[in-house]
């Protein structure tokens, strides 16, 4: 079992109340003593609180609530969100990290959270991982004005959990967990939804099995969890035992070898209407055709509504490279049907990887050369017209259905490309 326990030095760094802190910096305010809420003021009291300052958090006000949920006796300032500002500050922070480690040892988990593998740098700096974390957090504060918290662990999981659970409560905003801390710090975590990757729905499912803490989960029969939840059950058991073999390179995507697209949905979607959203793959196919590329790997994932939590992302290797949207949709649906657990969906991600130059036409026993050429010419014609007259000039009939988002999406500045 020794090989499943990584012994590296990971840092998980999160910027404290990031959006709210950025807005305070712009106003010359201290987020630890000023009540500021980031929300769209045009939406009235029903607006979602995207972020609140640490001052308000200390009074029990949570992010991702509604303005009307804030007690009337608490006074606060509303700041409208400014995404360009947050992206700019995030880039500044990442540039600080790059002073200490190379890009290949950084995984940007979100706009305000990153993983750093500092294992191979400690001898060079002649510092412990804790001392290096202190230096980095101090540099972030001095360079950008932002405060950060940091979790340290021998794997990415324990680094993340130590940051989530303990670091924010320590005077220096740093917490370090080792495998020796699993029994005393990881296992007592309850309710289960406090643990990274377990949402309210999964918590209820585990409670039905008599599992109420990470200790209960760690001691539960591995094979029963696998039988009940599939690969997710295996992952749950591993995480409850502090096991995570992920390396930062596992999350790297080479820009020139993959195209990806993701979409955050404006309402909850379910299995019956998700295929309409998956048809956004046409954006990737048009990009491949424009660059004379085909792909041999399809990646597909979804994230559930925040009230549920959780997500999945899996990939498939194709026997034949393709730029055909129908083929890619078929494989996305195969992944979806295998791993979807009927929860409400709020984000869909698709990637076309292992890109190759399109040379000639690949035939199979079900196609004729004339049919493939005909389809290729149709796609090129559609691409040309949409490029000249607008993305929504020629659309599939399904794009006119009420659940389709393509017309709205085409009015925006593209999706996420990697």
Image (spheres, rainbow, N blue to C red):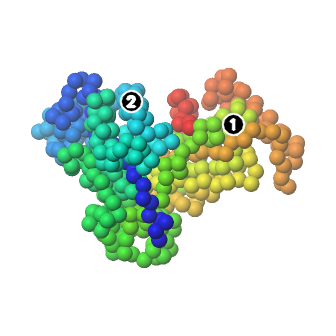
Task: Indicate which label's residue lies in the foreground, 1 or 2.
Answer: 2
Q: Is residue 323 left or right of residue 36?
A: right
Is 82 or 110 nearer to us in this picture? 110
Q: CA distance from mark 1 to mark 2?
A: 32 Å
Q: Is residue 129 left or right of residue 399?
A: left
Looking at this view, name the residue that lies furthest to the left. 73
Is 246 or 104 nearer to us in this picture? 104
The answer to which quarter of the image holds residue 65 is top left
User: Can you identify the residue that label 1 sits on?
Assistant: 288
Location of residue 97 with respect to 188 vertically, above or below: above
- Residue 51 seen from this side: no
Secondary structure beneath label 1: helix
- Residue 40's label in the rendered image is none
The answer to which quarter of the image holds residue 91 is top left
Q: Is residue 12 left or right of residue 257?
A: left
Lower position in the chain sequence, tag 1 or tag 2: 2
For disc 1, the neighbor class at 10 Å (few under 14, some 14 to 19, many from 20) is many
Q: Position of residue 269 (x, y in %)?
A: 49, 50
Q: Position of residue 159 (x, y in %)?
A: 36, 53
- Residue 92's label in the rendered image is 2
Labels 1 and 2 touching (C-beta < 8 A): no
Disc tally is 2
- Residue 394 seen from this side: yes
**Residue depicted at 30% across the width and 68% down the height:** 183
**Residue depicted at 73% across the width and 45% down the height:** 322
Is 246 or 279 nearer to us in this picture? 246
């Amino acid at each position: 079992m020794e090989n499943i326990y990584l012994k590296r030095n990971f840092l998980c760094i999160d910027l404290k109340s990031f959006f709210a802190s950025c807005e305070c910096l712009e106003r010359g305010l201290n987020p630890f003593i000023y009540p500021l809420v980031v929300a769209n003021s045009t939406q009235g009291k029903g607006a979602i609180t995207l972020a609140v300052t640490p001052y308000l958090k200390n009074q029990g006000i949570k992010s991702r609530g509604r303005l009307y949920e804030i007690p009337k006796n608490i006074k606060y300032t509303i700041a409208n969100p400014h995404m360009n500002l947050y992206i700019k500050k995030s880039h500044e922070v990442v540039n600080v990290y790059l002073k200490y480690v190379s890009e290949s040892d950084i995984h940007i988990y979100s706009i305000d959270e990153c993983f750093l593998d500092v294992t191979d740098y400690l001898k060079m700096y002649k510092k412990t991982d804790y001392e290096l974390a202190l230096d980095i957090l101090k540099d972030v504060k001095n360079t950008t004005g932002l405060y950060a918290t940091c979790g340290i662990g021998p794997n990415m999981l324990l680094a993340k959990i130590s940051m989530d659970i303990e670091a924010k409560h320590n005077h220096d905003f740093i917490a370090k967990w080792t495998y020796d801390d699993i029994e005393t710090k990881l296992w007592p975590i309850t309710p289960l939804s406090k643990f990274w990757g377990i949402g309210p729905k999964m918590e209820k499912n585990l409670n039905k099995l008599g599992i109420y803490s990470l200790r209960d989960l760690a001691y539960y029969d591995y094979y029963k969890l696998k039988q009940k939840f599939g690969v997710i059950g295996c992952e749950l058991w591993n995480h409850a035992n502090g096991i995570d073999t992920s390396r930062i390179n596992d999350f790297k995507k080479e820009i020139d070898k993959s195209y990806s697209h993701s979409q955050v949905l404006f309402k909850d979607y379910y299995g019956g209407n998700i295929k309409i959203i998956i048809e956004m793959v046409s954006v990737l196919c048009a990009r491949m055709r424009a660059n004379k590329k085909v792909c041999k790997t399809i990646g597909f994932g979804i994230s559930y509504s925040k009230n549920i939590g959780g997500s999945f992302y899996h990939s498939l290797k194709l026997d034949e490279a393709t730029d055909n949207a129908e083929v890619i949709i078929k494989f996305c649906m195969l992944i979806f049907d295998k791993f979807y657990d009927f929860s409400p969906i709020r984000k869909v991600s698709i990637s076309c990887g292992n890109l190759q130059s399109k040379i000639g036409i690949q035939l199979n026993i079900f196609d004729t050369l004339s049919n493939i050429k005909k389809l290729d010419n149709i796609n090129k014609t559609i691409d040309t017209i949409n490029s000249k007259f607008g993305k929504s000039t020629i659309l599939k009939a399904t794009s006119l259905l009420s659940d389709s988002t393509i017309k709205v999406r085409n009015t925006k500045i593209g999706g996420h490309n990697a």
